[in-house]
Image (cartoon, rainbow, N blue to C red):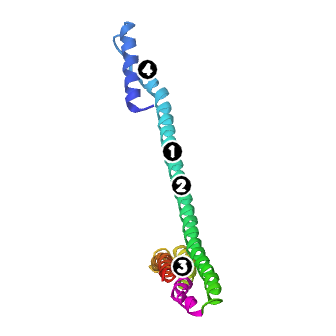
Amino acid sequence: MKASEFATRLQDEVLQLTINGQKTIETKNLTQFLEEKIPLLREAEKDDHDIAVDFRLAHYQAQIQSNTQMFASVLDYGKHALNAAMIINAGAAVALLSLVSSLCGRNIAAGASYASALLLFVFGVLLAAMATGGAYCTQYFYTQSPETQNGKRFHVATVVFALASYGLFISGALSSYWALKS
């Protein structure tokens, strides 16, 4: 019960006494009435406080759980992006090697024009592998000492390596296209 509710209730009790014809209230009776009501007030205030604390605790726990799930999904998406970078570059390198081997059976000069594209795909695989290792180091440094800059440095390097790997795939694909076209 809030203090305003208690004051309203006390006012209602006094009005009821006035309606019943009582013109004065003895201090002994008022004191006895307050002694009965004050413990109820304190208990109600304690209950309100406990409810507010429980609400805040539940809110913080829900936030932590949400942040944890978000972090796990970010890690999962990052892992898939790194795997994709490695797979597309490695797959392109294997496909290009297959094409070059069939062309070399006919004409060695035709296969040599694909060497730069193959090199781009190989470096794309290397950068994707380095990005995967960088992701491990990023997590290691963030968990061991979050206040240092090492985690942030590895994080940036990992993103750069992964994006460079995708860039090398695009460059290798264009190089293959131009070699095929000529």
- Which tag, 4 or 3, sits closer to the chain's start? 4
- Callout 4–callout 3 Cβ contact below 8 Å: no
Residue bearing the label numbered 2: 66
Q: Quick one: label 1 or label 2, which is nearer the N terminus?
A: 1
Dot in front, 3 or 1: 3
Secondary structure category for the residue under label 2: helix
Q: How many marks?
A: 4
Q: Which span of residues is magenta-colored? A: 108-122
Residue 53 in view of the camera: yes
* Residue under label 4: 29
In the image, residue 15 sits, relative to residue 100, either above or below, namely above
What amino acid is labelled 4 in the image?
Asn
Q: Disc 1 vs disc 2: Cβ atoms closer than 8 Å?
A: no
Which residue is under mark 3?
131
Of marks 2 and 4, the one in the foreground: 2
Alpha-carbon neighbours of circle 1 within 10 Å: few (<14), some, or many (≥20)? few
The type of residue carrying mark 3 is Ala
Farthest front residue in view: 106
Image location of residue 153, percent across then percent down: 45, 80
Please tell me which residue lies in front, 63 or 81: 81
Residue 116 rendering spot, x and y as whole percentages: 51, 88
Q: Name the residue beneath numbered marker 1.
A: 55
Pinpoint residue 101: horizontal percent, then vertical percent: 64, 86
- Residue 93 against residue 74 in the figure, above or below: below
Side of 15 where 180 appears, left or right? right
- Foreground tag (4 vs 3): 3
